[in-house]
Amino acid sequence: MGKLLPLLGLLGIASVQAEMVAMEDGELSAVQGAGIGIVLEQVLMDASQATITINDITNASGQNVPISVKEFYLGATGSNKGAILNPVTIGRLNHPFTLNLAKGEELRSLRDDGQFVQTTPSNLAVLEFAFPERLATGGNACISGFAAAGSNCSSRAAEKVDMGVRFDFNVVPGGRTDIINVDITELAMDGSYLRMWGDGARAQLVGEARLNIFAKTIDIMSCAAGTTNCTSAAEQAARSIYLTNAYANVSLGYGKTQPLLLDVISNGQFVLELSNPVLAAGVNPLSPGAGAVDTRSGVGKTRAEDFYANAPRTNIVVDSLNFGGTRPGAGQAPTGGYDFGSNEIRGLSFNYLKATSHDL
């Protein structure tokens, strides 16, 4: 397992010294605590021979529905689906993973036009966990050879990873087993973050999240190699989906007027909700009544204009989507099968969303 190098992030440090030195009062006054930076150095994870079983998920009859996690690996690129694993360093000292406690007005999010904007409310403390950042200028290709994904990632080619995992689902105890086997190459998640804070008006934990996934290839197979009907190359190809040059920027929440509401209801189920961004806290969007806001003038118009101008959008882009073909080599587009070509969803925003977990 690689070493974790936690670093106390200090603004204004021009170079790293080999020894600690005393600082004058004037120097100390210019230093601000910027949280904790983390670099994952020489990481290699190989659980290809291990099985982790998740229990206590029940179906409608109260029967346990186990989920087995198998064949997990993570390492440097060029792994050939985990067959050749080498360690990888993720992040570096000037672009680490960070854990911050900051004022809302100090945090920024990157819009699609390359501008950084404030999305969190002012005058409150926000806990943030963030991946290596995306940059306005001077970055690296987010996906090698695919300019459409942008070149504002701080991660360099050597800091991207290959990873894979297999899930076995026994939805019907004692019956068939459903399998999802995923292999990803050249994965980067720059610019992803989770921010959380307490909302006094709602009396609950709220936040906002950004999930960025950049991958050269994603292969999804619905069987386990070597098992029944999954032995030959043709059988495996027939049960495979191939994504080439794929990325997703998923935005959940705009803290100023549409925070992501996190809740647990009395039966233990989790609830994620994005309320209407122009309604006051606690107003039912399906029956707003007196809480309705006129978006043509006043506060409602200001909130609506701010949301549609500045709230980060969700984009999902797959340069090549193929079903049933074969991939000739790492990073190459598949041949054969059925090619759906390029598929894109850009500029998606959520005016209202509510997701609740349920027992199977």
Image (tube, rainbow, N blue to C red):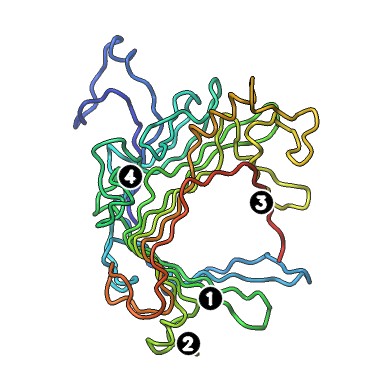
Of labels 3 and 1, the one closer to you: 3
Q: Secondary structure at mark 3?
A: strand
Q: Give the structural element (helix, strand or loop) at label 4.
A: strand
Reading the image, the residue beneath label 1 is 179
Secondary structure of residue under mark 1:
strand
In the rendered image, the residue lying farthest to the front is 296
How many angstroms separate mark 2 from mark 1 (CA)? 11 Å
User: Could you tell me which secondary element the residue under label 2 belongs to?
Assistant: loop
Indicate the position of residue 208 as horizontal and vertical percent values: 54, 39
Tell me the CA gap for discs 2 and 4: 39 Å
Instruction: Give how far across and how far down residue 197 sits, in percent.
Output: 58, 32
- In the rendered structure, find residue 286 and report the number of the disc placed on it: none
Q: CA separation, marks 3 and 2?
A: 36 Å
Q: Which residue is mark 4?
A: 39
Examine the rendered structure and indicate whether residue 97 appears above or below residue 90: above
Q: Residues within 10 Å of mark 2 (few under 14, many from 20)?
A: few
Q: Residue at x 58, y 24 (%)?
A: 302
Horizontal arrangement in the rendering, residue 90 relative to residue 237 (left or right): left
Q: Pointer 2: what residue?
A: 227
Q: Quadrant of the C terminus?
A: bottom right
